[in-house]
Image (tube, rainbow, N blue to C red):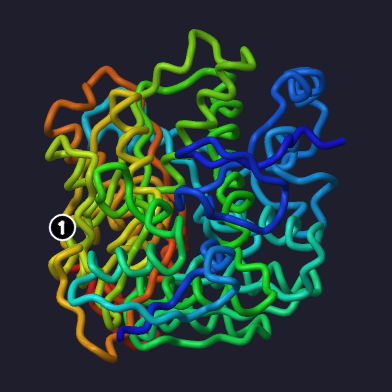
Amino acid sequence: MTTVSGLACRECGHAYDKVAVHVCEHCFGPLEVVYDYAAVAKSFTREALAARPTSMWRYHELLPLDGPPTVGAQVGWTPLVRADRLARVLGVREVWVKNDAVSFPTLSFKDRVVSVALSKARELGFDTVACASTGNLANSVAANAAAGGLRAYIFIPHDLEPSKVVATQIYGARVIAIRGTYDDVNRLCSELAGKYNWGFANVNLRPFYAEGSKSYLYEIVEQLGWRVPDHIVAPMAGGSLITKIRKALLELDKLGFIEGGAEVKVHGAQAAGCAPIVEAVRAGRDVLRPVKQPKTIAKSLAIGNPADGYYAVRAMADSGGYAAAPEDEEIVACMRLLAETEGIFTETAGGVTLGATRRLIAEGRIGPDDSVVVCVTGQGLKTTDPLNLPPPPIVGARVAEIDSLLKE
Amino acid sequence: MATVRIPTPLRKLTQGLEEVSAAGDTIGAVLVDLEAKYPGLKERLCDDKGQVRRFVNIFANDEDIRFLQNLETPVKEADEISIVPAIAGG
């Protein structure tokens, strides 16, 4: 039984049916899924949840399908790791890492949004799916389309990390690289979606797709024992994840799930080389200045014209959060810091999030007695190039050689 | 006259046409001409103050007009103008 009543424009409120549309034809505002929360509350209880399988679909009443998921039924329920060693280095009492670097099947939080988008694509009768991607979405659409028996077309900027390209092609998807930035790819896909009858995960399926991100927050709160931390720090590219984190907090609060209310400061992180949302927050504006030519090692966050930027700014402001944008060297240093203290290897985006966390602590936005959840949304093996670690020494298979090496 | 590429959500107003022609020597003037030919189109793209709505992207020959001179961006014959809704990250 569905809990979804329809779609509505976030700007002007105009209502739409549950179909593959993403833009309000009256004001161009983005469309958003509308739930019947009274219907949700009937079956969505702590007791019911306790008996459900450990996947993101345990929260199915708050996800926008009409039936059970047909793609990605096992996605979600990644570890929430208590990071005491990292906390000591950061000088903060309580730090947690929500680790989607080990998301099944493609090692990033995009599996959450894609399982929703592709299941919805099937409900709507599409046999072909597509996306514009900086890499992680490409991997996830390709893999989940293969597992779901859907054809996939993937559009990427021409200069993506080779590992992200391979990890898309391997699933048999048709991968097309576009000469240009991610924003150029995005614009192309927006035009293609009007021409081809494909389900584009982040274009015409976007209202459904974006809802999948909420499961990341539901899991954090449930894994903390239905309480919330003082702070959540999340990476921002298009600004959708942080917007949905805030929405999910308010939903859980409305449904009476959070002990002591949803008072969480939600902070955003971008790389200094592409930080249009952070810049707006720190300047106290809600007008975004797009970045024409992003320049950062954090390619998965390199979106110069973030579609949900305004809502991201509002999510941070309304929650009392702030934003920070570390430089590339800090990003690499923080990838190493997380790996060396907690044994978690995250991609550049995770380095951005931890780098921003460190800056927010230094600025006093996050206090020494506070609790923080750091959102790690992707896997380090996908972005090894910027690390530039020295090659290990090569010696003969003799004890004496090891002895002399260790004496150095 | 410049060619204007019309996105799907606006094609109801252009009788289903994907591309239309419009006159004007700036983007702003082109929008005025579009409104004359396809009434209702401008209010979809611009707010009460006449500014381009924040979820609308307008490109003049592949360049976002926010990097040029916004509505004052000059338009020449044979220029191609695209109107593109904002879309999500990936």
A324 or B65: nearer the eye? Answer: B65
Q: In which quarter of the image is the N terminus of chain B?
A: bottom left
Residue A122 image point, x, y percent: 80, 62
Is the residue marked by circle 1 packed among few (<14), some (14-19), or many (20+) residues within 10 Å?
some
Q: Quadrant of residue A311?
A: top left
**Residue at the spot x=58%, y=73% of the render?**
A194
Res. A53 in view: yes
Q: Could one spot residue B89 in this view of the protein?
A: no
Determine whether A51 is above or below A152 in the image.
Answer: above
The location of residue A95, given as percent across then percent down, is 37, 31
Residue at the (14%, 66%) spot, across then down: B72
* Residue found at x 73% / y 79%: A151
Residue B28 locus on image (x, y percent): 23, 64
Q: Nearer the viewer, residue A62 or B15?
A: B15
> Which residue is nearer to you in this view: A395 or B24?
B24
The subunit carrying tag 1 is A
Q: Residue at image x 30%, y 64%?
A: B32
Q: Considering only vertical position in the picture, is A242 above or below A207?
A: above
- Judging depth in this view, the residue of A98 and A240 nearest the camera is A240
Q: Which residue lies furthest to the front in this view?
A: B36
Q: Which amino acid does label 1 sit on?
A: Glu
Residue, disc 1: A327
**Residue A13, position in %: x, y?**
54, 35
